[in-house]
Each structure stands twice: as C-alpha cells, then as structure tokens.
C-alpha cells in the first residue's frame, strides 16, 4: 500500500473509531481451561547492530584494543616513536605496539584511544586498566603512565585520573592498574605514555603493549569481562523468556568469510580474532568504518547472560548461505551441499559447547571458561532470513544431523524476510515438510499492518511447527520511522493477537534491541544509550507490560461475541496466571475518544467472586509522535493506579479507558 493510501486508511479508521459511543462489554471466559502460554513467549532479539556489543552491552571502553582493525591504529592517536609489530603473543591477534625512545630526551612517546564515540566514565567509579606488556628495551624496567583525560578542558591539566604501570619483565605479562574517576565525563580520552624523568628519555627505551583494556569494575553481576550494568539491567528488567543471539544478518555475513563464527568468540579474550561487521558499511548513508566485532562479548558470555536473566538461550548459526540481500542476483556466497559439513559441524559443536559434558571436546572449552555445568540449551536457529530453494535444501542436512545426534533440541527454521507472499508461503510449506519445531517470521511493517493484523494467527493451522515472531517493529511511514508513542501503541494492539494465539505463537521478540545514539544503522530500536545513560523507548515499555504481565494460560475475551481485534478501535487479550493467581487483561484503545468498558468475568466457580482492587497500568501520550529521549527519558512511561473494589458489580468491572491508550488490568483471584 502506498503512503497516501495508508494515511487515508488510517484517517478513515480513526474517524470510524471516534464514532464509538456504545458501551463495550468485554466478556472474559474465566471458566475456560485456557491455552498454556510458553515461558519463552515474550523474549529478546539481540543483534550486534547499532554498536550493541562493542561500545554498548560489552563494557570494554577501548576501541581496537588488539590493533587488529584493517588500520591497526584505528581509534588510536600516536605521538613519538610508536611502531606496529606483528609477532605478538596471541596467534589470532598478532599485532601489538612498540613504544620506543622518541628521538630526543625531551620528546614524548604516547598513545591515545578515543573509545567508542568517546569514553564514558562516572564519578566515584573504579576502572581497571589492563595490558599485556614486556620490556623490550635495555633498562631494568619501564614505567608507563596511564591517564583518563578531557582534552577539551580549559583547566591546567587534561588528565583527571592517572596511574602508573611498571613493566619489569622481558617476557609478556599481564599488568593492571586501578583508576577511580573523580569526574563524570561522557567523552574522555585514554592515554598511555612512556614515562620520562625531566627531559630524560634515553635511547634504548622500549616497551611492547598488547590487548590494552579499560573496564568498569562494576559490571552486570560483577564479571571481569562483563556487561555494561545499566544496559544489562534494563534488559533483565524485561524478564525475557528467550534470548536470541547474535543476530540477525550478522549471522549470515556479507559473504561466508564475514559470517558470525561462534568458535572465534570463545576462549581467552586476548586470542579471539576480530570480525568486520557488515553493519559498518551496509547503509552507505550511515557508515561506520570503525565498527568491528571484537568477539569479547562472545557465545560464552551470551549463554551466561541468558542464564543470569532467566531466559532460554537461542543461538542462531549460519546455514551456509551469506546474506541474500547483499548477494543476489549478481553474486552468490553459498556453501554448496558438498561444502556444507563444516557448517553442520559448527551447529553440532555448538550444542556440545552448551550441553556437553565437561570432558567432551567443546564442553571442555565451556568448563575451562568457568562453567562446567551445561547451559541446558533447548533450541537452535539455523539460518536467518534465507529464501528460495537453496535454504530448505541446506536446512534439511542440518535437521537430519541434529535430529540424529541431539533429538531433544528444538530446531528453528525461517520463513524469510517477508511477512507474506509467495516466498513466505513456499518456506512455510518447506518448514512443515522438514518438520522444524518453530518458524521464525519477520515483519518490520507499517502502521496498517499492526492495526490490521491482531488476528494474523487466529486462523493459522494448529498442527506442525509453531511460530517464533522473531523480528517485528512498527516502522511508521511518511517520515515516522522512529520510536514514537504511536508505533508502540499499535504494537501493543497487535500483541494482543500473539497472546490470544499462544498455542501457536511460542516466542515473540521486538527487534532490534539496542542502539547507540551516535552509532545506529537501523531504527526504531527498543533500548537506546549513549556513553553514560540508557533510554527506554515506548516500545520497551509495551514489551515490558507484556513480558512482566504474562500469564500461564491465555483465556478467551470477546466483544460482541468475537475476538477483540479492532472493533470500535479496541484490541484485547486475557490471561490467567496460575502461579501468581491473577487475571491480567490487556486492552489497547486506538480510538481518539475515551471509551467506557466493562470487563465481565463469566464462568467463575461459585466460590470465586471478583471484588478485589485492580491495578490499572496505563501507557499514554497526547502527542502520537512524542518519544522518550536521553534528555527526557521519562516523557512516556507506564503509570499504575488502583481501581477500588467498589467498582466491581457481580464480577463485572466497569471503567473508562482513555483515548489512544494501552492499559493492563491486573487482579488477584
Ligand atoms: O534487525 C535488523 C535486521 O533486520 C536483522 O539483522 C535482519 O534479520 C533483518 O533484516
């Protein structure tokens, strides 16, 4: 549908919604056994896009810490005598720097790192500087000054925090120094310099530096190679049921060489080879030449994070086809069926890495990294957004191998990048034929789609693979493709249909999850951040209103005898949580007027009477295009209040729901 028709349709619908003046009785069949809702239902799609990993969730503050970018000095400024060497101690990251006599006793040899859009540090927080180093000169020891600086200061000194490392061995060794920042600075610079007494550099001075790291001590759960606390906590607060990683398109790569290779992302961080992410250049209008994957945040860390936040881990691996958007029709980067075995091995070895005993080949790698117990992996995704015959042909090989060796593992196939149409139908047919457990559907779609698709799954076949609504977000048209309230309201309305169809929809995740405000390639995104702060979008709040108010069973809710899928602008779903002993009703009112609604509970047992206080959590903005920003992060947040028990009359709660509003009603039974 073109933009003009979309607006016309929207306007017509809003006019129609605004005619609503009749009472709306939403009948909840509380007596129904209901449909079990999977614990994986509301989850996360995590991709290393928009600087989500390095510069984002991964708490490392130094860019290009191992000097392995195509330009080994990317991110670094040098003064004096600095040489790039390439026979370092880590075979997969051979480059390092040699800092030597600058050529004059008064000159200086130093290196400065710019971090990711600057280095964010907070007052009172401790930072660990670590470096692998050796004394390569002719003096007994060399001292290296370490500084956090504010180059733009008007003060006497640029450094606001400093320490010294004494490199006293000709052998490679790891050195550390702790810094406590007295200031909060969004864009600091990190410096290391060959120390000199007053004009006393001497020829023969040399020190070698490799894997230079600056990490906040306070990370999520305190891990040394850990995650940025505020971002990880925002993710954890979603109480996600499933955590899919590491993408997205990066799983596929622009070509097979640049696909995400999980084996490169495990083991000691110093020896994980980097990868150039396709998101550095995919969109020439938002190009980031310095965007690489250090793999410091790798599969072990993703599994651990999933475990820590109580989500099922869902890794996705390449099926041997590189991103088709980047290759077809002029180019191909596929492994032929004869060349597929290493890809299949990657999938099988990954399952062993996650679940195998600590003395198996890949289980040992996990155990040596600190996790002898298995991660209890239950699902694996094969391929991301593939299409055409080549995908099922390859997937079939994976399915056979995985079923044979690990019959207990759920396999997720893909219906490609399109939400419907010939390719979509073809792949669904093939997924049924191959007997995968879930099919990953993607829809980045406009307002119309979200308004009109709350019933998308009502008529899906009930046999065969289940649905993983793996990537979706409302992409507004006419210049409205960003995180505003309207998009999130329509997502909320649409999601009632996911919940109602919990027997077929087993997983759902908004996408993408993370974006750095200075480094994004794709929007909207759920969580935004800069170097110091995090901003939760309205879509985040909608996701959280669902995921933290998830039931154990979906039960019928009807308006005029039918599912509530837009009649008079209303959308609704109902769940019972048999653990928390709650009924939870979600209602989105897309009309431009407040509406009177009655929640009428039918089928309650004789002993059951609803006359409890009801928590009424509302997400609303008068301005459809208002948004949360880092400057004003709480412009639109859910507001909870309590409806007094006196509002009940014979198990019916009558209240009013504001215009353009999403509400969650929670009540104990
Ligand atoms: O979420 C951004 C991209 O959208 C993902 O990488 C891909 O799967 C989809 O095309």
Image: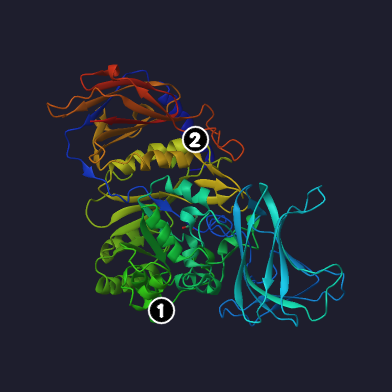
Q: Residues within 10 Å of mark 1 (few under 14, many from 20)?
A: few
Percent of width and height locating residue 157 = 79, 53
Depth check, mark 1 against mark 2: the one in front is: 1
Camera-nearest residue between 102 and 277? 102
Residue 452: tell me if it is visible: no
Figure quadrant of residue 189: bottom right
Residue nearer the viewer, 526 or 252: 526
Which residue occupies the foreground of this view, 170 or 187?
170
Sequence-wise first label, 1 or 2: 1
Q: Quadrant of residue 405?
A: bottom left
Mark 2 surroundings: few (<14), some (14-19) or many (≥20) residues within 10 A: many
Q: Secondary structure at mark 2?
A: helix
Does any atom of ligand 1 lie closer than 8 Å to the CB of label 2? no
Quadrant assignment for the C terminus: top left
Q: Is residue 441 left or right of residue 250?
A: left
Residue 457, disc: none
The residue tagged with tag 1: helix, strand or loop?
helix
Look at mark 2 in the image and give the residue it sits on: 486
Image check: 584 left or right of 16? left
Q: Is residue 334 visible?
A: yes
The residue pinned by badge 1 equals 342
Q: Position of residue 217 (x, y in %)?
A: 55, 56
Q: Is mark 1 within 8 Å of ligand 1?
A: no
- Location of residue 585 in the rendering, given as x and y in whole percent from the top left corner: 31, 32
């Amino acid at each position: 549908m073109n933009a003009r028709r979309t607006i016309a349709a929207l306007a017509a619908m809003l006019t129609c919604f605004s005619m609503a003046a009749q009472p709306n009785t939403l009948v909840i069949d509380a007596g129904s056994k209901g449909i079990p809702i999977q614990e994986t239902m509301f989850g996360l799609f995590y991709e290393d896009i928009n600087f989500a990993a390095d510069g984002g969730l991964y708490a490392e503050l130094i860019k290009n810490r191992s000097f392995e970018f195509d330009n080994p000095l990317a991110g670094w400024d040098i003064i004096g005598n600095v040489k790039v060497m390439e026979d370092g101690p880590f075979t997969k990251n051979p480059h390092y720097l040699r800092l030597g006599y600058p050529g004059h006793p008064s000159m200086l040899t130093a290196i400065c790192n710019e971090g990711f859009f600057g280095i964010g540090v907070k007052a009172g927080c401790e930072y660990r500087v670590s470096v692998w180093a050796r004394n390569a000169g002719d003096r007994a020891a060399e001292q290296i000054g370490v500084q956090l600086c504010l180059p733009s200061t008007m003060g006497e000194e640029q450094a606001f925090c400093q320490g010294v490392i004494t490199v006293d061995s000709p052998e490679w060794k790891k050195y550390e120094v702790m810094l406590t920042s007295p200031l909060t600075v969004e864009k600091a610079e990190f410096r290391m310099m060959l120390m000199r007494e007053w004009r006393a550099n001497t020829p023969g001075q040399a020190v070698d530096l490799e894997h230079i790291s600056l990490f906040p001590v306070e990370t999520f759960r305190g891990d040394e190679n850990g995650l940025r606390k505020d971002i990880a906590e925002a993710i954890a607060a979603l109480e996600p049921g499933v955590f899919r990683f590491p993408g997205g398109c990066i799983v596929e790569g622009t070509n097979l060489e640049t696909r995400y290779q999980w084996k490169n992302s495990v083991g000691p961080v110093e020896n994980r080879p980097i990868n150039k992410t396709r998101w550095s250049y995919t969109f020439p209008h938002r190009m980031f030449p310095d965007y690489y994957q250090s793999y410091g945040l790798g599969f072990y860390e993703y599994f651990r994070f999933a475990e820590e936040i109580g989500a099922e881990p869902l890794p996705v691996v390449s099926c041997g086809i590189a991103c088709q958007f980047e290759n077809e029709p002029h180019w191909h980067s596929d492994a032929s069926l004869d060349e597929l075995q290493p890809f299949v091995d990657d999938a099988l070895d990954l399952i062993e890495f996650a679940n195998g005993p600590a003395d198996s080949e890949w289980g040992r790698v996990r155990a040596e990294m600190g996790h002898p117990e298995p991660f209890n992996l239950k699902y694996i995704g094969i391929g991301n957004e593939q299409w055409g015959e080549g995908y099922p042909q390859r997937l079939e090989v994976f399915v056979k191998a995985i079923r044979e060796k690990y019959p207990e593992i759920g396999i997720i196939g893909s219906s490609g990048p399109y939400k419907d149409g010939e390719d979509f139908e073809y792949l669904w047919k093939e997924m049924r034929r191959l007997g995968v457990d879930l099919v990953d559907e993607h829809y980045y779609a406009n307002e119309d789609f979200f308004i009109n698709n709350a019933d998308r799954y009502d008529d899906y076949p009930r046999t065969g693979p289940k649905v993983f609504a793996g990537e979706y977000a409302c992409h507004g048209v006419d210049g409205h493709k960003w995180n505003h309230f309207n998009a999130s309201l329509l997502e909320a309305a649409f999601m009632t249909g996911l919940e109602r169809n919990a027997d077929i929809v087993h997983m759902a995740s908004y996408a993408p999850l993370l974006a750095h405000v200075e480094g994004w390639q794709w929007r909207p995104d759920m969580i935004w951040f800069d170097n110091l702060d995090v901003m939760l979008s309205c879509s985040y709040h909608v996701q959280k209103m669902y995921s933290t108010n998830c039931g154990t069973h979906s039960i019928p809710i009807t308006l005029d005898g039918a599912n509530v899928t837009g009649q008079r602008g209303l959308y609704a779903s109902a769940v019972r949580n048999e653990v928390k002993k709650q009924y939870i009703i979600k209602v989105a009112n897309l009309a431009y007027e407040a509406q009177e609604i009655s929640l009428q509970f039918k089928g309650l047992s004789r002993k059951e009477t609803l006359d409890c206080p009801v928590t009424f959590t509302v997400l609303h903005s008068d301005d459809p295009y208002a948004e949360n920003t880092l400057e004003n992060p709480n412009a639109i947040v859910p507001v909870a209040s309590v409806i007094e028990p006196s509002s009940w009359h014979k198990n019916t709660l009558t209240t009013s729901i504001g215009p353009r509003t999403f509400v969650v009603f929670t009540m104990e039974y």
